[in-house]
Image (cartoon, rainbow, N blue to C red):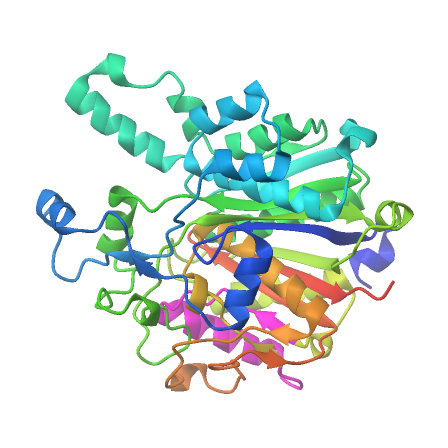
Amino acid sequence: MSGRQSVNLRRVVVTGLGMVTSMGLDVPTVWARLLAGESGIKRLSFYNEEFIQTYRAPEDFPGIGGEVTDFDLKELLQARKKNLTKEDLKQVKYTDRFTQFALAASLEAIQDSGLDLESENPDRAGVIIASGMGGVSSWEESMYRLINEGVRRVSPFLVPKMIPNLAAGNVSITFKTKGPNIALSTACAAGSHAIGMALRSIQLGEADLMAAGGSEAAITPLTLTGFYRMGALATGYNDRPEAASRPFDIHRCGFVMSEGAGILVLEEREHALARGAKIYAELLGFGMTGDAYHITDPHLEGAMRCILIALKDAGITPDHIDYVNPHATATPVGDRNEAQALLQVFKNKRPLVSATKSLTGHLLGAAGAVEAIFTVLSLKEGKIPPTINLTEVDPECAGLDYVPGQARLAPINYALSNSFGFGGTNATLVFKRFEG
């Protein structure tokens, strides 16, 4: 008997979606480009001859990524809020890029939900927003200033710009929510963990509605170099960036760094129905495990257990699942490990699997939230985004339908999304098509 069956937990639905990625600054734009197979990976704006000379970058240094361009928080706030307060203007000036992404995505998600927060009990509304790196760009910029210009040139706002919980904190302040106000930092599983913890808060009666997800803005010279030096990034694609992210392909060689945010509004089912909310899907289950194995390499058993725990929490069996949005970062070990885990869990009925990081790149702590949105939209619309750059499936990943090349129409009732992170941290979310 699952936890859902043995304990009288409240049901939770998704009523709002918000997103900022390199593929667009709102959900409709990103979703349309995703289904069309249009990559958001391109040459980085700061990667030029000056960068190469200044940092002595080697020839194979990856000067590509899923960089968010044309992002202006003030313009977005004006377009969506119309009148800006003094506090809004402060947030534009005194917040890091990762917080600004979170604010933009949260505003879209809340507006999409149709919630009138002024009429809600603020004590029953909360925020959980994750980030793997926090305000790393502010930290890096301030270090340069400290070294080159001295102490007095470092901003007094450095600490509130930098610490990871200020995305959640600023969203809570902006929307006057007084329930749970939490930040998580569990590497690349963080966004999914945030959604899972928000699910628990509502199930257990700690809140009626939550804004949950992740935000990341870690495309900086130092962070990029760090991942490059550990051999995690795809190299050799500076002349064709869109081909670099190759999940499950035999020629994959690492992930492509990206940035952005994804926020979901989760709501107690009866609360949503009572106000006539548009409901995208039901969030049915959540699982999390630890590999206890290696700081970067995943372990098959940890991924399998995570999926099975989430399915048990949802009260369903593997045969129910029609679609999986995998972690699938395009690392040689990670993709092989996840493919084998999926093959062992889904022995009788193998679901469709599409690796959306082939299009978006890897948003680190925001990845799970962005991919949860894709999973929800797939359920809602019966459309499965493609896996691009899959020219030859790695034999060690064979046996699954990866929806190569083109999006596919397929009615799906149950779907899951995986997120796995450094340190052996794993998260799986299970969603169900909402039928009223």
Residue 257, x across and y down, in percent: 36, 55
Identify the residue at image location x=26%, y=16%: 153
In the picture, residue 384 is in which quadrant?
bottom right
For residue 217, above or below residue 397 = above
Q: Please say whether residue 184 is visible from this viewpoint.
A: no
Q: Is 69 one of the magenta-colored residues? A: no
Task: Decide: is 261 above or below 328.
Answer: above
Q: Nearer the viewer, residue 176 or 294?
A: 176
Q: Quadrant of residue 32?
A: bottom right
- State the quadrant of the N terminus: bottom right
Q: Position of residue 345 (x, y in %)?
A: 61, 76
Instruction: Give coordinates of residue 264: x percent, y percent.
Output: 65, 49
Q: Is residue 114 left or right of residue 151?
A: right
Q: Is residue 341 left or right of residue 120?
A: left
Q: Residue at x 39, y 54 (%)?
A: 258
Q: Which residue is found at the position 38% from the left and 79% from the top?
A: 249
Q: Is residue 338 magenta?
A: yes
**Residue bounds of the magenta highlight:** 323-350
Count of numbered circles on the image: 0
Position of residue 388 measured from the top left corner of the image (x, y, whole percent): 43, 76
The residue lying toward the viewer, choosing from 33 and 289, is: 33
Question: Looking at the image, is 196 positioned above or below residue 309?
Answer: above
Residue 243 appears in the rendering: yes
